Image: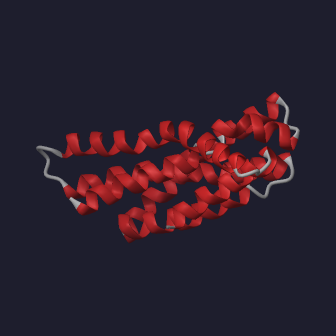
Amino acid sequence: MRAFHTTWLAFFASFVAWFAAAPLMPLIRDDLGLSRAQVGNTVIASVAITFFARLVVGRLLDRHGPRRVYQWLLVLGAFPVMALGLAQSYEAFLLLRMAIGAIGASFVITQFHTSQMFAPKVVGTANATAAGWGNLGGGVTQLLMPLLVALLASVGVEAWLGWRLAMIVRGLAMLA
């Protein structure tokens, strides 16, 4: 059960990171001077890349197993999450959002790993539970990231710096 809980927790952390920029988009849009179309393009890039990332991750799972692939995904995914806080242009923001979108491949790892851990009679329930807890990360981030920015603002950090620090904190949490 420890492996099961670690797996859904990694999935949860991945989805928090994948969706971390969304609730901060008003601050990011103002800071970087993004148009509505540019914001839309970053959202499309963040989701579209998951198709390709999931294909690659599926192949890696067959060769290296879920523990190693999850470790690689979390560590490698942490860097673009942190780097997003350093973005100064639309192009950098777009490329980093696309790189962060690869974290969406965590779904494949979770389902693969959970399917290996449980007997056929309960694997559906186990997969549904892991997927539910993991997807909850996408919802929790809607609360978590604005709270983090508000906490930073309460100690005097300006909004333009607050969203950037929040992304760096999120990336560091992935490494942990």
Q: Residue at x 54, y 53 (%)?
A: 103
In front of the other: 19 or 125: 19
Q: Please provide percent x and percent y for residue 65.
A: 36, 67
- Regarding residue 47, the answer to whether it shows in the image is no
Check the image and report above or below for 108 versus 35.
below
From the top left corner, tell me how far across and down residue 171 is, in percent. Answer: 60, 60
Q: Quadrant of the N terminus?
A: bottom left
Q: In this view, does 153 lie to the left or right of 121?
A: right
Question: Toward the viewer: 7 or 120?
Answer: 7
| Residue at 81%, 53% in the rendered image | 92
| Count of picture labels | 0
In this view of the protein, which residue sits in the foreground, 118 or 64? 118
Please give left or right for residue 61 compared with residue 151 in the image.
left
On the image, the x and y values in percent for residue 78 come to 59, 62
Residue depicted at 80% across the width and 28% down the height: 36
- Res 68 → quadrant: bottom left
**Is 62 left, or right, of 167 in this rendering?**
left
Residue 63 visible here: yes
